[in-house]
Amino acid sequence: MEFNAEVGRRLRGEIAAGGSSIAAMAREIGVARSALDNYVTGKRAIPVPTLYSICSVLGLEPHRILGWAEERLRDEAGHRESNVIPLRPDSNVPGRSDDVGEVAFDSPTEHDDDSDDLYD
């Protein structure tokens, strides 16, 4: 049961990191939302085909999810020090180094339908 819960925790995190939700992922892979919810909460063991479908959508290899879950359980049992496994960053979200100051109407880009006259 602990292994199922750990696999589910990792999948929930990866689904969120991929910019999806449990409901959206369930629709995308063609399973009932309630079934996927049971898998990611560890209430039921996730079927291998479902794990492969989720991983395919997320661009992950299924053995990575299982390996991370196994490593976490070993770490919690005190067999070795824990490693922090970061979630994959979403490439659509800019990082701090990408911060650019923006000021309204100071854009170098001209627009034919400029709306500055609306504010006179």
Image (spheres, rainbow, N blue to C red):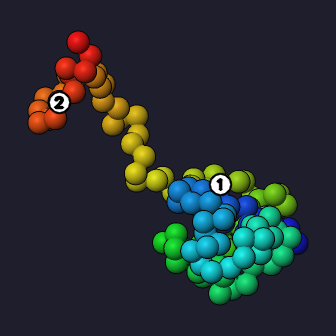
**Which quadrant of the structure image shows residue 30?**
bottom right
Amino acid at dot 2:
Asp
Foreground residue among 71 and 79: 71
Q: Residue at x 67, y 64 (%)?
A: 22
Q: Can you say which quadrant of the picture contains the C terminus?
A: top left
Give the image location of residue 90, x and y in percent.
Answer: 46, 53
Give the image location of residue 100, x and y in percent.
Answer: 30, 30
Give the image location of residue 118, x and y in percent.
Answer: 25, 21
Marks 1 and 2, the one that precedes in the sequence: 1
In the image, residue 67 above or below residue 102: below
Residue 50 marker: none
Is residue 63 among what the camera can see?
Answer: no
For label 1, the residue is 83
Label 1 to label 2, Cα distance in Å?
53 Å
Give the image location of residue 98, x and y in percent.
Answer: 33, 37
Q: Are marks 1 and 2 in contact (CB under 8 Å)?
A: no
**Which quadrant of the structure image shows residue 41?**
bottom right
Amino acid at dot 1:
Asn
Q: Residues within 10 Å of mark 2 (few under 14, many from 20)?
A: few
Q: Residue at x 11, y 36 (%)?
A: 112
- Residue positioned most to the bottom: 49
Foreground residue among 30 and 9: 30
Q: Is residue 41 left or right of residue 1?
A: left
Q: Residues within 10 Å of mark 1 (few under 14, many from 20)?
A: few
Q: Can you say which quadrant of the picture contains the N terminus?
A: bottom right
For label 2, the residue is 114
Mark 1 element type: loop
Mark 2 element type: loop
In the image, residue 87 above or below residue 115: below
Q: Is residue 43 left or right of residue 35?
A: right
Q: Which mark is in front, 1 or 2?
A: 2
Is residue 40 among what the camera can see?
Answer: yes
